[in-house]
């Protein structure tokens, strides 16, 4: 078997795999669906090479009839992939010591134009514009491992507006265009309904720059530490907010407090801080508990966009700034709605913890074939991601299993 499972007797590992898959797929309504799920997950874990369906089943010695059955199960069968991801999360999450949830997205390079959502678009995975799909994902991060909590395929606006392509890719009628931050917000809202410990949400600038997402999370009492750009407008700690007086003949009196000065860019505010505002902070990050240090400042601010554009009341939150010793300027900025009494070490830890998501993507793609799905079905893409999550969850448990053999 692959990864950790490859280091133990095959029969022993397979028995554990069969038992785990049987547990998490118990909600699937049909025996054949549950059998096909096991066949697919076994193929993802036990065999190297490309994890697309035909070669995976060929390596397992499965018949042509079984191939047709698994293909139908993957592409067209009406089972709920979210229910499978939830079962994996509720089974494995408590074992990981979860400290944060991370939102991110990743690219799936594709040839042609018929796979749902595929087009020439920027992908951070590729580092450039390329023909690809983009998947938004949510992951739990703990000091004992990581675990995907949800997947959503990003559909560009031109895809959503094209009935012929929608029909060919079997995109449900109720699926409308959503931005990546909107998809991430939905994934978070869904996972918060599960039997799973809530945790602060982390994300890169693509998500932190969304004032709508930050406002949505805060309104749902979801703590976050989200990266923002240097030009993000902020009202600094010296800003005074007051309700302006009513102007004669202007109708109802104002109710929302307004700032006494214009906003500043995050970088300008950081550069104006006294040198003593920055201090070296030591913190632990990552599943292996790496000890790191960084030079940070922590300032109470209010984001300008919700106040100026959306006419919302001012909301104080943390601006976290990292400015490495000797650097010409700050390297990173984050906004966080964690309480005012939050310790600097915790803020720094959460700000720098998001990188762990790269470990998830590395295993999901490099070992488990996340980006190997070749079907052209919207449901199939989500089914594949859920089954890859199942394989990943099993391997996470194997790493924690005291009886599993480790490499010499």
Image: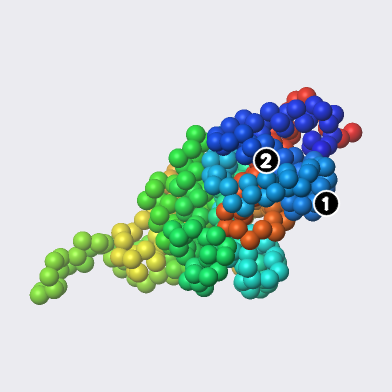
Q: Which is more toward the observer, 326 or 10? A: 10
Q: Which is more toward the observer, 68 or 137? A: 68
Real-space Cα separation, disc 1 to disc 2, in angstroms: 20 Å
With respect to residue 90, does 295 lie above or below? Answer: below
Report if residue 251 is visible in the image.
yes
Residue at the (70%, 49%) spot, across then down:
68
Report if residue 364 is visible in the image.
no
* Marks 1 and 2, the one that precedes in the sequence: 2
With respect to residue 185, does 9 lie above or below? Answer: above
Residue located beneath label 1 in the image: 49
Badge 2 density bin: few <14, some 14–19, many ≥20, Cα 10 Å: some
Residue located beneath label 2 in the image: 36
Question: Percent position (x, y) of residue 383?
Answer: 61, 49
Q: Nearer the viewer, mark 1 or mark 2?
A: 2
Residue at the (62%, 71%) spot, across then down:
119
Farthest residue in the right direction?
Answer: 408
Question: Percent position (x, y) of residue 241?
Answer: 29, 62
Farthest residue in the left direction?
Answer: 249
Snapshot quadrant of residue 372: bottom right
Farthest residue in the top direction?
Answer: 403
Q: Is residue 238 left or right of residue 359?
A: left
Residue at the (58%, 40%) spot, across then down:
84
Quadrant in which the C terminus appears: top right
Q: How is the image coloured?
A: rainbow
Q: Is residue 257 left or right of residue 174?
A: left
Badge 1 density bin: few <14, some 14–19, many ≥20, Cα 10 Å: few
Count up the numbered dots. 2
Residue at the (78%, 44%) spot, across then down:
63
Disc 1 + disc 2, Cβ < 8 Å: no
Quadrant in which the N terminus appears: top right
Question: Percent position (x, y) of residue 236?
Answer: 41, 63
The secondary structure type at the circle numbered 1 is loop
């Amino acid at each position: 078997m692959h990864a950790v499972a490859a280091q133990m007797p095959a029969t022993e590992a397979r028995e554990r795999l069969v038992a785990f898959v049987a547990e998490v797929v118990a909600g699937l309504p049909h025996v054949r669906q549950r059998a096909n799920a096991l066949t697919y997950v076994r193929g993802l874990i036990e065999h190297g090479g490309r994890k697309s369906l035909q070669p995976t089943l060929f390596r397992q010695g499965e018949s042509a009839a079984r191939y047709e059955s698994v293909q139908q199960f993957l592409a067209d069968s009406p089972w709920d992939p979210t229910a499978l991801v939830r079962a994996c999360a509720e089974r494995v999450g408590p074992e990981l010591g979860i400290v944060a949830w991370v939102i991110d997205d990743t690219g799936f390079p594709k040839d042609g134009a018929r796979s749902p959502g595929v087009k020439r678009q920027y992908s951070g995975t590729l580092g450039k514009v390329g023909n690809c799909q983009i998947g938004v994902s949510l992951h739990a991060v703990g000091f004992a491992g990581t675990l995907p909590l949800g997947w959503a395929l990003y559909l560009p606006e031109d895809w959503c507006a094209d009935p012929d392509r929608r029909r060919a890719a079997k995109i449900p009628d109720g699926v409308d265009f959503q931005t990546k931050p909107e998809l991430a917000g939905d994934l978070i809202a869904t996972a918060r309904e599960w039997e799973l410990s809530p945790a602060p949400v982390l994300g890169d600038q693509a998500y932190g720059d969304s004032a709508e997402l930050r406002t949505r999370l805060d309104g749902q009492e979801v703590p976050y530490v989200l990266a923002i750009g240097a030009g993000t407008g902020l009202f600094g700690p010296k800003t005074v907010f007051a309700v302006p007086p009513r102007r004669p003949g202007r109708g109802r009196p104002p109710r929302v407090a307004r700032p006494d000065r214009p906003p500043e860019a995050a970088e300008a505010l950081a550069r104006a801080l006294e040198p003593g505002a920055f201090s070296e902070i030591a913190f632990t990050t990552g599943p292996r508990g790496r000890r790191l240090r960084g030079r940070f400042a922590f300032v109470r601010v209010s984001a300008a966009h919700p106040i100026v554009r959306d006419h919302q009341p001012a909301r104080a939150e943390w601006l976290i700034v990292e400015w490495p010793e000797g650097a010409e300027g700050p390297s990173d900025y984050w906004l966080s709605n964690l309480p005012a009494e939050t310790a600097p070490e915790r803020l720094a830890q959460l700000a720098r913890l998001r990188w762990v998501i790269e470990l998830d993507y590395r295993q999901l793609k490099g070992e488990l074939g996340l980006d190997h799905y070749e079907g052209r079905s919207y449901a199939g893409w989500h089914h594949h991601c859920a089954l890859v999550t199942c394989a990943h969850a099993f391997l996470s448990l194997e790493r924690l299993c005291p009886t599993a053999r480790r490499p010499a």
